[in-house]
Amino acid sequence: MNLTLYGYLDSWIAVDCGMLIRQDLDGNPLQVPDPQAIKALNLSPEALIITHGHEDHIGAVVWLWPHWGCPIYATPLAAAMLRTRFTEQGLAASAIRVIEPGDACRTDAFNVRLLPVPHSIPESCALLIEAGSRRVLHTGDWKLDPKPVIGSPVDEQLFRSLAPVDLVVGDSTNANVPGHSHSEHEVAQALIDTISQCEGRVVVSCFASNLARVLSIARAATRCNRRVSLLGRSMERMVALARQLDYFDDFPPLVPVNDLGYLPPEEVLVIATGSQGEPRAALSRLAQGRHPHFELTTGDSVIFSAKAIPGNEHLIERLKKGLARFDVRILDEFTHPQLHASGHPAQQELEQLYRWVQPAYLLPVHGEPIHQTAHIELARGLGITADLVPTNGDVVHFDETGLSVEQRHPQQVCLVQRNALSPMNASDNARVSAHGTLFVAMTLAATATGWTRIGRLMLDDSESSPLDEDSFCEWMDEQLDEITTDTLSGLRRLLHSRITHWLSEHVQHAPDVQLQLVATEAEFLLDGLPT
């Protein structure tokens, strides 16, 4: 959820404040960072600085900022998105201060300069944070795109001028991926090539915030003599914001969705939300035949111009099965990988940036331990000191001797429910359902390739439809063999979604699932808590 706090003497600043959607809980509530951990440290940030406008970086601001009341510094797009949220929540937006990429802001102890970097949303910035004699580069989310569709490539000389920095707090998302990420310009050309070969209606689904991708899709439609329409409120809202900020000067005129039926199929292209299988998104409604003005037919094509977020696989597969009933052609990251580009740096890009800024130390963030460990190995190969993989709730001390964990603050799960913050408790976890609850518990050990079950799988289906325990256990062992996550919390998330999907196909009324995992080694976590 990307909330980081930096302290020097008695002064503190916060960087980003994001959320995630709990698709494993009824109602898909939002989870936000635990404000009690910050309160326990007896600190209040003097400023909140936003690196970019993705939900996992701004989605919790309206929920946590009222506890702080500090100025919020954000670039124009992120500021506009935040103002919309503040208005919806009845909050005064006067604390939101627009800062242009390349400019700096100051607090009592900190000087922070925003450094433009390409990413999958415009105006993304790394931060050069200066306090006392220390200079820290907080990379945010970034890549080295030589030809971005919106914005400019990274200014190499600017980053070279920063060298040497004391510490990089760096994006690890693709640190285990060799080579260089694809350019958005390459995706734009691939979209033109692919759409030109489609015969019926074309629906392209991507993240609404990826405005460069949305613009590329619209331009491809124009090149292929197709009219553009939008499906999904978030898509409509983001396109409107992009137009207000002059990012979409050549965006074609839009066709209202209720007019699409009057156009020949080969002249229609729809840009839709829902690439992650979200049940209430536009693409899911199409897959269920529930859209009031638009329906898919044989010969149409659906393009997924987005990569599956880990944990969403079962939702996406269910979506594709629904689409397949309409006999449409499906193009995704597996069959057409050229239709998507990551917004995060692969190994070659990480090496390039570190040669420019010459950091003494690295603190790897983002991703899972497997990505952070790969990041550490890469950094050490460049002569950078990297010894610490941080955990949520760690207070990390940095001085002339390096990095060390000073304190650890357990993080409770904090949900947005009934328009208010509340800690997750046993009743939330039990999730009462009309079809009952299936309780699953097992003891596990990590192996070189995955996980293995130790002893008996414990099932209690007394509150749900009965199931074939032998088939379920055999299937469960296969899943444990396949899943490669290094963390118990990650394993629980992935298993939970797969179990839910299995039940939907094997029992008449799928129950909710209460899953308890216990690791045989003390250093593993039990649902996010020390064993």
Image (cartoon, rainbow, N blue to C red):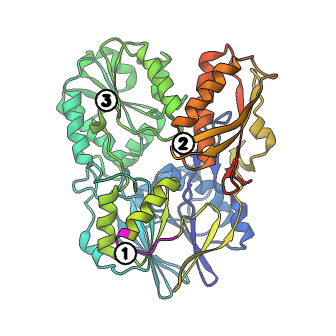
Residue 428 % position (x, y): 76, 39
Q: Is mark 1 in CB contact (under 8 Å) with mark 2? A: no
- Single out the mark in the foreground, 1 or 2: 2
Residue 366 % position (x, y): 49, 57
Residue 529 % position (x, y): 72, 53
Q: Amino acid at mark 3?
A: Thr
Query: What label does residue 450 carry, if any?
Result: 2
Q: Amino acid at mark 2?
A: Gly
Real-space Cα separation, disc 2 to disc 3, in angstroms: 26 Å
Q: Which mark is first along the chain, 2 or 1?
A: 1
Query: What label does residue 383 carry, if any?
Result: 1
Q: Is residue 521 left or right of residue 5?
A: right
Dot 3: within a 10 Å radius of its alpha carbon, few (fewer than 14), some, or many (20 or more) residues? few
The answer, for residue 232, to whether it is visible in the render is: yes
In this picture, which residue range is highlighted in magenta?
381-387
Given residues 392 and 296, the one toward you in this image is 392
Q: Which mark is first along the chain, 3 or 1?
A: 3
Q: Amino acid at mark 1?
A: Gly
Given residues 491 and 333, the one toward you in this image is 491
